[in-house]
Amino acid sequence: MVFLALAVLGVVLPVLPSTPFVLLAAWFFARSSERWHRRLLDSELFGPMIRNWELDRCISRRTKAVALVSMLLAGSGSIIFALDDDRLRMATGLLMLVGCATILLLRTCQACDDKAS
């Protein structure tokens, strides 16, 4: 439930990624609660992403694009407007690079991008 709560927060907070948390929640629910796992799979928001991951171990182009754009906008906004210390700016930039690399290294779903929907 903690990972599901973090995923829901990630939908409205651009700095917090939803994708890894919803995938973790689905993984734990698949092993502990068929009811909650089914609810996630039936969700319009999270269902296609979970099915793509469970069936093909891939993330859709759209999910990747949303993750990258929201992370870059929120992170850049923090670096420019919210952080005064150059060390914090550099740390934030480094974390953004790690996040972007992680997203880009995950396999992208082929053909019909949201085939599981």
Image (cartoon, helix red, strand yellow):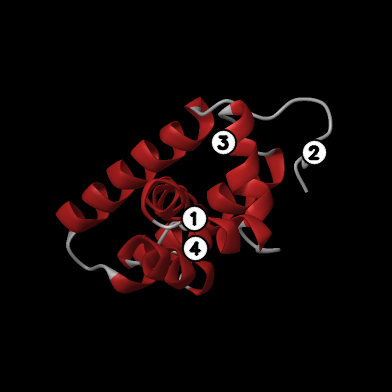
Looking at the rendered structure, the kind of residue marked 3 is Glu
In this rendering, the label closer to the viewer, 3 or 2? 3
In this rendering, the label closer to the viewer, 4 or 3? 4
Q: Earlier in the sequence, mark 4 or mark 2?
A: 4
Q: CA distance from mark 4 to mark 3?
A: 15 Å
Q: CA distance from mark 4 to mark 2?
A: 22 Å
Looking at the rendered structure, the kind of residue marked 1 is Glu
Q: CA distance from mark 2 to mark 1?
A: 23 Å
Residue named by callout 1: 34
Q: Earlier in the sequence, mark 3 or mark 1?
A: 1
Verify CB contact (< 8 Å) between mark 4 and mark 2. Answer: no
Left or right side of 49 for 76: left
Q: CA distance from mark 4 to mark 1?
A: 6 Å
Crowding near pointer 1: few (<14 within 10 Å), some, many (20+)? few
Q: Earlier in the sequence, mark 3 or mark 2?
A: 3
Residue named by callout 3: 54
Looking at the rendered structure, the kind of residue marked 4 is Trp
Give the quadrant of residue 60.
Answer: top right
Give the x, y percent position of residue 57: 56, 29
In this rendering, the label closer to the viewer, 4 or 1? 1
In this rendering, the label closer to the viewer, 4 or 2? 4
Crowding near pointer 2: few (<14 within 10 Å), some, many (20+)? few
Verify CB contact (< 8 Å) between mark 3 and mark 2. Answer: no
Verify CB contact (< 8 Å) between mark 4 and mark 1. Answer: yes
Q: Residue at x 80, y 38 (%)?
A: 115
Looking at the rendered structure, the kind of residue marked 2 is Lys
Q: Which mark is residue 83?
A: none
Instruction: Depth check: give the residue in front, 11 or 68.
Output: 11
- The correct choice, above or below, for 59 with respect to 35 in the image is above
Q: Earlier in the sequence, mark 4 or mark 3?
A: 4
Residue named by callout 2: 115
